[in-house]
Amino acid sequence: MEVSRFFVELSFNGSGYHGWQRQPNALSVQQTLEEAFSRLLREQITLVGAGRTDAGVHADQMFAHYDSSSAPINCEELVFLMNGFLPNDIALKKISKVHAQAHARFDATHRSYKYYITTIKDPFRNNVSYYLKNVPDVALMNQAAKILFEHEDFQCFSRSNTDVKTFLCKIKEAKWTQEGSSIVFHIVANRFLRNMVRAIVGTFLEIGSNKKTLQDLEDIIKSKDRGRAGFSAPAQGLFLSEISYPSKLFKD
């Protein structure tokens, strides 16, 4: 039977998962989805995600692809059936048939993240934002964000001992906004390194609290030394917010 490739668009609350990627001794989003797909389609399904998310990180929009040789099934119906199988903290939005060589990770043109900080203690936002008692200087952090556009090598913000071929990333957008009691960091790039956004946020918060200067940021980036950058901001405030692909990948 002919094998077809499909893209899956989904969102998830990562609080109860040890990240996206399947783990030997911990529950992941990938494992939960693969088990549900395999049960419904009655074949072993393996998902390839658009990227990794760490434990506790969330996604407003995530993509993955899988191959299937099952008898054709209406994609909208499959979304409905899958959402009935899945726990409440994972939701499928759409399944689309794509060209055979389409790849959820390598064909993405850019990815967007948001990091949420709240300045008011709120028990209902504990798992989806980082609570800060002291409000940082947002204007100063926006000055720091502009410095990112002047660089492409962000090894200083990458998790140590990461096996990657390059530390080059092209930042397309980086800014802080204040929305009521929330402070939100928006960042868009063609790719991100492991732990990169959380390390940037932690460094910027130290700048916004006058623990580091803008010149320190320049020096940190040029040093390529993770040890000189700021702390890694807690996972619960981070959301993968958007992933974009060329329209030519999709068949429908």
Image (cartoon, rainbow, N blue to C red):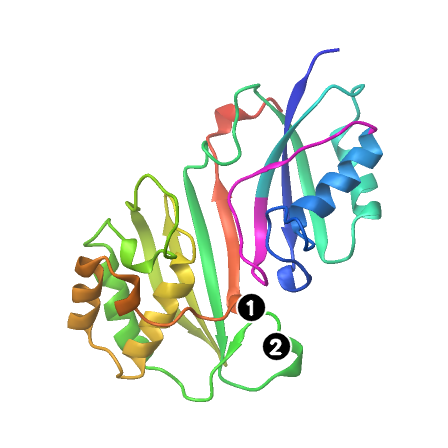
Where is residue 147? Give x, y as percent.
Answer: 21, 61
Q: How many marks?
A: 2
| Residue drawn at (23%, 54%) of the image | 149
State the image quarter where residue 110 is shown. top left
Q: Is residue 120 within the magenta segment? A: no
Residue interval drawn in magenta:
42-62
| Residue drawn at (79%, 27%) of the image | 43
| Residue drawn at (70%, 54%) of the image | 27
The CA span between labels 1 and 2 is 8 Å
Residue 79 is at least partly visible in this image? no
Report the quarter where the N terminus lies.
top right
Label 2, secondary structure: give it: loop
Tell me, for residue 55, which label it has, or none: none
Q: Are marks 1 and 2 in contact (CB under 8 Å)?
A: yes
The three-letter amino acid code for the residue at tag 1 is Gln
Which residue is identified by label 2?
A: 126
Name the dominant secondary structure of the magenta segment: loop
Where is residue 6? Give x, y as percent.
Answer: 64, 28
Where is residue 59? Give x, y as percent.
Answer: 58, 54
Report the quarter where the C terminus lies.
top right
Q: Is residue 202 above or below residue 74?
A: below
Pick the front one: 76 or 72: 72
Which residue is identified by label 1?
A: 236
Pick the front one: 229 or 64: 229
